[in-house]
Image (tube, rainbow, N blue to C red):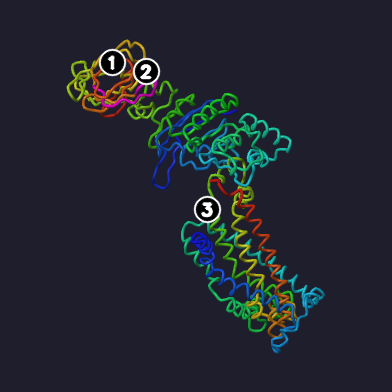
Amino acid sequence: MAGISIRAVEKAYGAVRVVHGIDLEIAHEEFVVLVGPSGCGKSTTLRMIAGLEDISGGDVWIGQTRVNDLPPRKRNISMVFQNYALYPHMNVRDNLGFGLRIAGQSPQVVTERVNEAAGILGLSELLDRTPAELSGGQRQRVAMGRAIVRHPDAFLFDEPLSNLDAKLRGQMRAEIKKLHQKVRTTVVYVTHDQVEAMTLADRIVVMRDGHIEQVGTPMQVFNHPVNTFVATFIGSPPMNLLPAVIHEGQVLLRDGSLVPVPARLRAKTHEGQDVVLGIRPDDICPVGHGLGETDEGTDIALTVDLAEPLGMESLIYTSIAGQEVQAKLYGPRIVQASETLSFRLALDRAHLFDAATTRSLDVL
Amino acid sequence: MIAFLRTRRTALIPLLLLSPALLTMLFVVALPLGFSFYTSLTAYRLVRPETIEIFVGLRNYIRLLEDWEFWRVFGRTILFLAIALNVEFLLGLGIALLIAKITWGQRTLRTIMMFPMMFSPILVGFQFKFIFNDNIGILNNALQSLGLTDRAIPWLVDGRLAMFSIIFAEVWMSTSVFAILLLAGLFAMPRDPLEAAKVDGCNSWQVFRHITLPFIMPFAFIAMTIRSLDVARAYDIVHVMTGGGPAGRTELLWTLIARTGYMDARMGQANAMAYLSTLLSIAFTWYFYTKLMQARRYMGGVQ
């Protein structure tokens, strides 16, 4: 029964600072995903919460306790590692029960909790196997089982799915989500995969270079990215970014073509301002093949360079103002390369970023 | 007809290719083994070569089974082995754990640690014979200078102390076998299970006891296999330091066998002893090998 509070936490290795004083409040039973490219400090942050790394500055609180100086075993958390980190010399039953036995629980309690966790995760048939005899997905489930048997205050997941193949990753992702619905506990989950972040999180924390760039629900982060980094990191395929200048109330692209400034941003632009127009592939669609009607759009004729049909939709590579952009076509229509189509840009969902600061004009 | 010859020829090729290995094995291993086994069934005495033809059946073995002195030496060798291996294991483990913690100068320390192994066991024996000598030995000298004792302790004259001294020399020389293999094990150990155990509630001792130790035991078993063969044939250090004395109190299997075979010239009897002591080595090797295989089974295939 505990939230986690991270206050001005820093991590430095000698002179090299890898986490620069981050603040984050995680509510009880909340599922928070730390996401960012490798080296952004997300794993280090998680390991500081776990107690596997010393905290160089600031405080970490779990519930009502400041845990900076507590060893991992006194923090009442459990952790799932990328490489599963199972105990190779113990069978599944002993792996699951290890923490309980160390804590001095009676054999009946251990058996009961192990069976309960094995039931939740579908491991009942595998209890007598050793980790060497399990598949990757099974090992990952054992690692999760080991985390839940102890009824901890919080689960910490460190890139738990990155060792699995794509199909299994999708399945396990769903299982983690189901698990959280069954076993309501605070979760901090680290990943570099924005799809995992979007699908699992109550709130996403986007990190870069030891700083938090944005915190918000998946939809907030997706719909209202605060800067170009978050805009391109969240969402797949990434948002298209087109450098431009504001000219006479319009966005002047590099080739001289003009796109209207989205209505909501008109007051925030001024003549001659250097901006970046950000627009997701889903918001550049051939007329009649988009995501329903847009309130505010502008049409533009584009030549298809390459089309990747995916069945119900196609990913289209084309170029605007001499720059490659990705667009989408919804519906089972075949598109040929070099075909010229009229595309509609959904301006109500487009973004403008300040070219110098990369910050979104929406939040300025 | 041609087809028949061809099949004959292809059938012979494997044997032909194997023949160098087979012949070597035959002359280097099988023949001497067979010959020594045969002599253990004769009354062969080195000084009277014609006795090799006197076939006595199992008489040498039967005499050994009734020989109380032989079995006492047999038992002493097992005790010697057990103490030496355990002490070397514990010391080697300690050294390996300490060195694994060091970040600066680790390579140098690793090299220094191997120094005792670079000396010939005979020289180690001579050196410790000097150290433990009751009159001029450096150890008694040091003890007396420090005022810890006022009389000379008869390290190599008292039966128990002599055994202790020999084990000490043996341990000094070979602890690094354990240390280096256990250190290799510690280096090969994945970090994740250690961290998982810490989060799972283990203190440092519990992490060591439940995770580290099981992981490095296969390495310890390899060291034990090597060292059990080594210690079971101990001869040089014992021969130099005490010659099996005082009054046979430090006699081990191979000093006894060598004395029977070369001093008393009763080679038939000595070979019978040697065959029985081989059983000891086989038993130890088999035991450690089984443990190793058990441990390897679960270590395989897990990252």
Element marked by disc 3: helix
Measured along the vertical axis of the image, is residue A120 above or below residue B45?
A: above
Task: Read off the magenta span.
Answer: A303-314
Circle 1 is placed at which residue position? A344
Disc 2 packing (10 Å; few <14; some 14–19; many ≥20)? few
Q: Chain of mark 2?
A: A
Q: Chain of mark 3?
A: B
User: Could one spot residue A167 in this view of the protein?
Assistant: yes
Q: Chain of mark 1?
A: A
As shown in the figure, which amino acid type bears the numbered disc 1?
A: Arg
Residue B167: give x, y in percent of width and height: 66, 71
Element marked by disc 2: loop
Quadrant of image for the C terminus of chain A: top left
Checking the image for residue A332, the label placed there is 2
Cα distance, mark 2 to mark 1?
18 Å
Q: Nearer the viewer, mark 2 or mark 1?
A: 2
Element marked by disc 1: strand
Q: Quadrant of residue A246 in the image?
A: top left
Contact between marks 3 and 2 (CB within 8 A): the answer is no
